[in-house]
Amino acid sequence: MSGLFIISAPSGSGKSTLVNQVRRVVPGLKFSISYTTRAPRAGEQDGREYFFVSRAEFEEMIGRDEFLEYADVFGNWYGTARRFLHEAEQTGEDLLLDIDVQGATRIKRKIPRAVSIFILPPNRLELENRLRHRSLDAEDVIQRRLVTASREIENYQRYDYILVNENDRLEESTDALKSILLAERRRQAVTEGQLSAEDAGLMAKAESFRLDNMRERLEPIRASF
């Protein structure tokens, strides 16, 4: 059975960059590219960042029950196609889903074995700086994203693992995410008595990012919002 990983984060947390990095260093990962009705941004390509479709096309896909989950975000539809899970199962790869809190909740209800990971910025000020630096959104959209981020962060307890994506520590964050993916992969492949010393070390590292082990670190981040 293929593994299923869910990654969520407030917009501007560096999730896309982190996912792109970990896909380069962890083999056997199939990435689910979401469908959306929003217009492509500068530099985005259809089939790379998203599949860009019309609202009518998206609603036809809903009617055909082609989505594992879908949601309206800021007035645009976003959805995860079922076909990616089927393709991963056929090839024996693990499927990585990059979806928001709404979608993650729906996937966990349908597929409880899915492993969920929530990525956070170090604080509100840094998130705001990142949103402004990328210059993709108007001021009212930035403010709306910050309000949404505050709400999303309150859902952190629904996730299995928490990562704080610190400034200028991409390599460290990538290594942390890699450890979680590989530890969960090993956990599903072997029994406890068969764990090697390397497996045990990998799992210990991943455990440090478990929700219960991250609660104290999260308090000042939550307070900043």
Image (cartoon, rainbow, N blue to C red):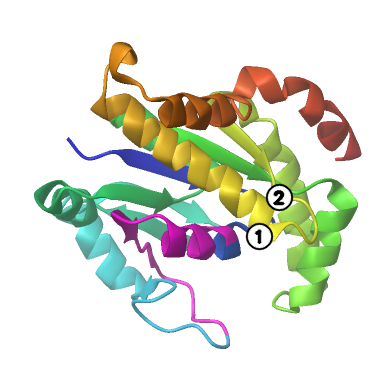
Q: Which residue shows up at 53% across the image and 63% down it?
A: 21
Picture coordinates of residue 115, whole percent (x, y): 41, 32
Region rendered in magenta? 18-41
Which residue is identified by label 2? 165
Q: SS of the residue at dot 1?
A: loop
- Quarter placement of the C terminus: top right
Q: Is residue 97 left or right of residue 124?
A: left
Q: Which residue shows up at 44% across the image and 65% down it?
A: 24
Pick out the residue farthest to the top: 193
Whether residue 112 is visible: no
Q: Quadrant of residue 105?
A: top left
Q: In which quarter of the image is residue 18?
A: bottom right
Pick out the residue farthest to the bottom: 42
Picture coordinates of residue 173, whole percent (x, y): 65, 50
Q: SS of the residue at dot 2?
A: loop
Q: Which residue shows up at 69% across the image and 77% down it?
A: 136
Which residue is identified by label 1? 14
The reply to whether the magenta stretch includes residue 23 is yes
Does 207 sit above or below residue 101? above
Image marks 1 and 2: residues in contact by CB distance under 8 Å: yes
Q: Is residue 104 left or right of residue 79?
A: right
Does 52 sit above or below residue 8? below
